Image (cartoon, rainbow, N blue to C red):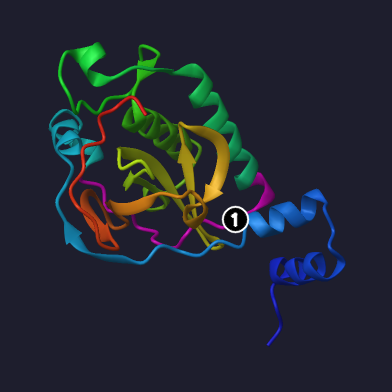
Amino acid sequence: MNSSPIEGLLRLCAVAGLAISACGTAQAWAAGAMVTGGLTSQPIGHYDFCKTHADECSIRPADLAPAKMTDGLWRKLASVTARVNAAVKPMSDLEIYGKDEVWAYPDKGVGDCEDYVLEKRRELYRMGMSLADLLITVVRKPDGEGHAVLTVRTDRGDYVLDNLTDKVKAWDATGYRFLKRQAIDNTGRWVSIRDGQPVLVGAVQ
């Protein structure tokens, strides 16, 4: 069976020990896909978000195939990550709204982790990406704190866009424990990822 160009480049890099950008890109594109389980509970913040954005939470994407990873897509993901991270000032829901777990677009230039996710998702969707490939995801950081990131599904694996770094990372290279994410076939439903406990994600982080 013929290997893919990326697989061939990875072998070449490994044999030659080449420290070049092409090798770095090939390694970055060698991620795997998350294994998801059945339907699970919707985060309360997303539930409330859907009350005011009902049209965004009842979409059933027609194309469920993962996005094709290309140099252009990689640059787009990196650009959107850096731009949104720079444009939004981190601030807790308590500081902004006087209560926890408010998911909203950071239109006033402030927000917490899920607000960064919503903005990146909105921008990439406007650029033509399918919502089946732009999934709000709840994780637990190594310190045990809840956090939200954007998972991007591609034919080279799942990648994470995070407000804590401008680097686009393979999901299994983040150090996070993945709990749940939006279902690919319904923007209002959520599925489990491995085993985990319910967690709040309303902190600034």
- Where is residue 112, by image quadrant? top left
> Left or right: where does residue 156 sit relative to residue 12?
left
- Which residue appears at 79% of the width and 49% of the height? 21
Residue 119 magenta-highlighted: no
Give residue 3's position: percent from left, percent from top: 70, 78
- Residue 200 or residue 136, whichever sits in front: 200
In this view, which residue lies farthest toward the front? 143
> Left or right: where does residue 75 sit relative to residue 132?
right
Residue 67 magenta-highlighted: yes
Q: Amino acid at mark 1?
A: Met
- Which residue appears at 80% of the width and 64% of the height? 13
Tell me: residue 126, above or below residue 15.
Answer: above
Q: Is label 1 in a helix, a strand or a loop? A: loop
Looking at the rendered image, the quarter that the N terminus falls into is bottom right
- Where is residue 106, by image quadrant? top left
Q: Main secondary structure of the magenta part?
A: loop
- Residue 156 or residue 195, whichever sits in front: 195
- Which residue appears at 36% of the width and 11% of the height? 108
The residue beneath circle 1 is: 69
Give residue 116's position: percent from left, percent from top: 39, 29
Q: Which residues are magenta?
A: 58-72
Tell me: residue 84, above or below residue 77.
Answer: above
